[in-house]
Amino acid sequence: MNDQIFLQLSGFIYLLAMVFYMSSAIFKSTKIGYFATTLSVIGVVLGLCAFVIRIVLLYKVSGSMLDSIPIANLYESLQFFALLLMVIYLVFEFATKIKVLGIFSTCVAGILIILISSINAPADVKPLIPVLQSNWLIAHVLLSFIAYVFFTLSAIAAIFYFILVSKGRQDPKYSLWVTTVSILVTLLLSLIIHLLFKQMIFISICIVLFIVIFTSLFYYGNNIPFYFSAFSKDINKLDRYIYNFTVLGFIIFTIGGLIFGAIWAENSWGRYWSWDPKETWAFITWLVYAFYLHARLYKRFDRSAVNAIAILGFIVTIFTFLGVNLLLSGLHSYGSN
């Protein structure tokens, strides 16, 4: 059995679902929306198959169910993050009947899966290294991932919030959502191109695509809010979702990411805190979302300014999750293996 085949299929299905979620919003078609949801469910099933196969393969080499949870390296982390994101998103969709967030939820999940192949993340099945053979692995890493997913959904809801409230090119809110969407679309297309033509320089692709996409969206994106006008009446509800997602993520990240991480660090390395790059950026992430909650609760800023912090927090979260592992070295460097 090969978990990579199921994983790649799930990524393709997510991107296909993204197209149908977008079409559903543009054409205001309930049937297309149902089909998009069906595709998302199929993608989750395929992703779950890949996850279970990975557990079986790991169990064969480790002999321990506890050491067979695939969340220990970059390949497994990206696989698990994409699956968890889509599971939690679908729970949200089924509970609220709101499908518009599926456009970027499927986009992010697809990006994560394409990233696995694009950077050739090692998919070898190996036993856990000794430092990871701990009961704290599941408690710390699993809760951190759940928090990351809530932060991601918070940012996705914030993007649509800015699409709905922006008033044209002169409005800073317009530039904010155009920039954010341009980054996501650029990353998605760049990874696909890099995957197909690996000899091409990735950074150059990103720069060229971002300039083209940003310019096109900035000058021709005025009509995009019209396609989502049906959701304008839900703007307060959308704002509440941003807050709820952030609160859930903040609480879980505080407990699982910081407190449990510190306890595990003391057990493994003899100290609760060492200013390792991963620890430092986790603390920065916590500070950004603490600032969001402070600004929200004490009404120091208007809603748009506060929700912009949610998008900033997502950028910091992604760097904490991926950037530190890929660009920096430290005690958590095994996460990139």
Image (cartoon, rainbow, N blue to C red):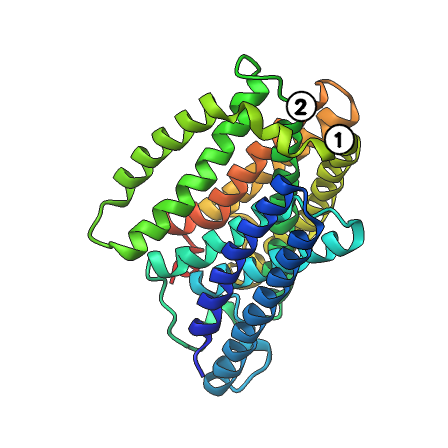
Nearer to the camera, 190 or 34 = 34
Q: Quadrant of the C terminus?
A: bottom left
Residue drawn at (55%, 23%) of the image: 222
Count residues near mark 1 (Cα–Cα under 10 Å), then give few for <14, some for 14-19, many for 20+: some
Q: Is residue 192 above or below residue 151?
A: below
Q: Which mark is residue 165?
A: 2
Q: Which residue is mark 1?
A: 235
Query: Mark 2: which secondary structure?
Result: helix
Q: Does the rendering let one see residue 329?
A: no
How far across and down, in percent of the image, does residue 55 sit?
54, 78
Residue shown at the point (48%, 65%) measured from the top left: 76
Image: 152 above or below 71? above
Q: Do the numbered discs 1 and 2 sit on residues whose CB atoms are within 8 Å?
A: yes
Amino acid type, label 1: Ile
As displayed, is residue 58 above or below residue 71? Answer: below
Q: Position of residue 9 (x, y in %)?
A: 47, 67
Q: Residue furthest left?
A: 199
Between residues 279 and 165, which one lies in front from this camera angle?
165
Give the side of residue 249 with respect to residue 194, left or right: right
Q: Amino acid at mark 2?
A: Val
Secondary structure category for the residue under label 1: helix
- Residue sitting at 46 percent across and 59 percent down? 113
Picture quarter with the N terminus: bottom left
Of the numbered discs 1 and 2, the one sitting upstream in the chain is 2
